Image: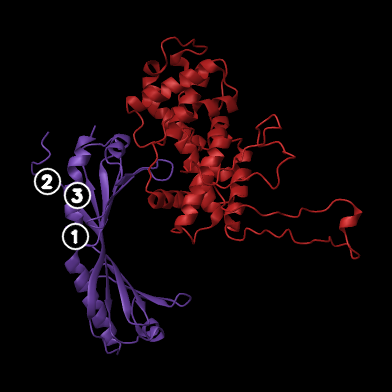
């Protein structure tokens, strides 16, 4: 008797003769592009690229074989969105896993069709925001705005709609999520970054800053830590990096200033002592 | 933890929105010319009529549909709507006051304590949504009452719902949860 162990067992990895299983390198023994069946279904099309050399142009200067006829007409919008997502992620150097997660989210939202009327770019930006959050490395809305043409308001709206459509929720942002990024952008040493993280965490624990956005608290904490060290930064510089107005930093700073001695970590080396911190 | 004791919380109704129909076509131009206290918005096809006695602003369409906003209670909304219908009648239209319905009630309530919003959100996951970057309040939706509450860290709560009863019961429902996460 026969036992079927597998129906159509086709290995989509590279063949055994080529010695790297790296999908990124062009594998000459394969036909067609690398499959991405997880995202766009049925990707067996061949696209005719723009020609090089004189033979590809006909009499009038137009190129022969004009149209890159994309045979995957369904989900062309989706492929477009994936391209846009990759572009946006490239601008802020996001790793591949976040991009993949974004693509998956977009596919889910697109198939559900509940947000069909919204601009695809807006949905893509919101998916990118959610993916960063889910991976534990949130980006502020303003950072996503900077790499997208969509307004913060629209991204925020799409964000809430997507959470409702996919019935998921995201964790709240904390001050610590942004510390390493902001501090390295400002060129602050590790000591200052650790001090700022400690200050922000303590400030939230002691509830000195009720109702303030964690970004503003983080910015104020960085200001305090940098002013106490040898690497001082102005409010304007920090506001620029964090995307908060310098008056906002001033407000949050005023709230944490009274308890400054308690907020610093125990082993911090003060370049400017606590009582000489600027008072705004 | 006395969450069930009778707490005298003042729920202040700030706005009641209602709609009614006049069952007849209204000539907006005539209202705009002959009516008192009217603003004609020709580009959108509406006339705004403001009443002084119950302080009400009404948006009137030529189809006969009218939306009244600015009342501070359901009865006041009804008085204002009737007064408005009367003034339209005086202008010569055959007005019949039908389909009066209170559509939205906005109320404000103040808790005697401050609230820890992150704690509150994590305890009330699916109903509560908090995005500090977008809005400083937690948005809590009660599906059964079709009410939305905005809870601020100062303890003030803004409730919107379809009628005054829903608003009152929404506040009662939220009180124990908010009490848990107080300072």
In the depicted structure, whether residue A64 falls above or below residue A30: below
Q: Which residue is mark 1?
A: B164
Chain B shown in which color? purple
Of callouts 2 and 3, the N-terminal one: 2
Instruction: Name the residue: 42% across, 14% down.
Output: A265
Q: Which residue is mark 3?
A: B171
Q: Is residue B109 visible in the rendered structure shown here? A: yes
A71 and A180: which one is in front?
A71
Instruction: Name the residue: 71% across, 46% down.
Output: A31
Bin the neighbour count of mark 3 within 10 Å (Cα to Cα): few under 14, some 14-19, many 20 and up. many
Percent position of residue B116, x then y: 29, 35
Chain bearing mark 3? B
The nearer-to-camera label among 2 and 1 is 1
Bin the neighbour count of mark 1 within 10 Å (Cα to Cα): few under 14, some 14-19, many 20 and up. many
Please say if the residues under marks 1 and 3 sit with CB atoms less than 8 Å apart: no
Please say if the residues under marks 2 and 1 sit with CB atoms less than 8 Å apart: no
Percent position of residue A148, x then y: 58, 47
Residue B8, numbered circle:
2
Chain A shown in which color? red
Q: Is residue A143 visible in the rendered structure shown here? A: no
Of callouts 1 and 3, the N-terminal one: 1
> Tag 3's secondary structure?
helix
Could you tell me how far apart the alpha carbons at marks 2 and 3 are, in whole angstroms? Answer: 12 Å
Bin the neighbour count of mark 2 within 10 Å (Cα to Cα): few under 14, some 14-19, many 20 and up. few
Percent position of residue B40, x then y: 42, 77
Specify the quadrant of the image occupied by residue B23: bottom left
In the depicted structure, whether residue B1 falls above or below residue A200: below
Of callouts 2 and 1, the N-terminal one: 2
Horizontal side, residue A17 vs residue A243: left or right? right
């Amino acid at each position: 008797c026969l036992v079927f162990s597998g129906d159509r067992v086709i290995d989509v990895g590279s063949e055994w003769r080529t010695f790297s299983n790296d999908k990124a390198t062009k594998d000459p023994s394969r036909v067609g592009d690398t499959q991405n069946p997880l995202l766009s279904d049925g990707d067996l099309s061949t696209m005719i690229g723009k020609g090089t050399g004189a033979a590809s142009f006909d009499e009038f200067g137009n190129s022969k074989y004009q149209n890159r006829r994309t045979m995957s007409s369904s989900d062309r919008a989706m492929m477009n969105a994936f391209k846009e997502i990759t572009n946006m992620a490239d601008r802020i150097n996001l790793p591949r896993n976040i991009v993949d997660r974004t693509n998956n989210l977009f596919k889910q939202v697109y198939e559900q069709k509940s947000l069909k009327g919204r601009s695809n770019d807006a949905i893509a930006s919101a998916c990118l925001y959610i993916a960063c959050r889910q991976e534990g490395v949130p980006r502020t809305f303003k950072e996503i705005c900077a790499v997208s043409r969509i307004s913060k308001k629209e991204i925020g709206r799409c964000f809430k709609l997507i959470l409702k459509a996919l019935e998921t929720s995201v964790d709240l942002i904390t001050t610590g999520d942004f510390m390493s990024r902001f501090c390295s952008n400002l060129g602050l040493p590790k000591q200052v970054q650790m001090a700022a993280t400690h200050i922000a965490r303590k400030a939230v624990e002691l509830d000195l800053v009720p109702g303030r956005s964690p970004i503003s608290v983080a910015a104020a904490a960085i200001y305090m830590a940098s002013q106490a060290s040898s690497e001082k930064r102005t409010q304007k510089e920090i506001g620029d990096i964090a995307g908060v107005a310098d008056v906002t930093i001033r407000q949050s700073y005023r709230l944490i200033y009274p308890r400054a001695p308690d907020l610093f970590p125990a082993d911090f080396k003060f370049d400017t002592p606590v009582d000489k911190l600027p008072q705004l | 933890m006395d969450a069930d004791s009778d707490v005298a919380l003042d729920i202040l109704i700030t706005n009641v929105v209602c709609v009614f129909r006049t069952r007849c076509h209204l000539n907006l131009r005539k209202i705009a010319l002959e009516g008192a206290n009217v603003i004609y918005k020709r580009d959108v096809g509406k006339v705004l009529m403001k009443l002084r006695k119950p302080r009400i602003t009404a948006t009137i369409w030529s189809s006969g549909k009218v939306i009244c906003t600015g009342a501070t209670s359901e009865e006041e909304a009804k008085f204002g709507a009737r007064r408005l219908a009367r003034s339209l009648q005086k202008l010569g239209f055959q007005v019949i006051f039908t389909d009066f319905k209170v559509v939205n009630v906005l109320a404000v309530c103040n808790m005697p304590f401050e609230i820890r919003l992150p704690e509150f959100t994590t305890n009330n996951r699916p109903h509560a949504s908090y995005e500090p970057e977008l809005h400083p309040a937690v948005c809590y939706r009660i599906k059964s009452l079709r009410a939305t509450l905005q809870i601020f860290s100062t303890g003030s709560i803004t409730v919107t719902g379809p009628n005054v009863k829903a608003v009152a019961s929404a506040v009662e429902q939220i009180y124990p949860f908010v009490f848990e996460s107080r300072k």
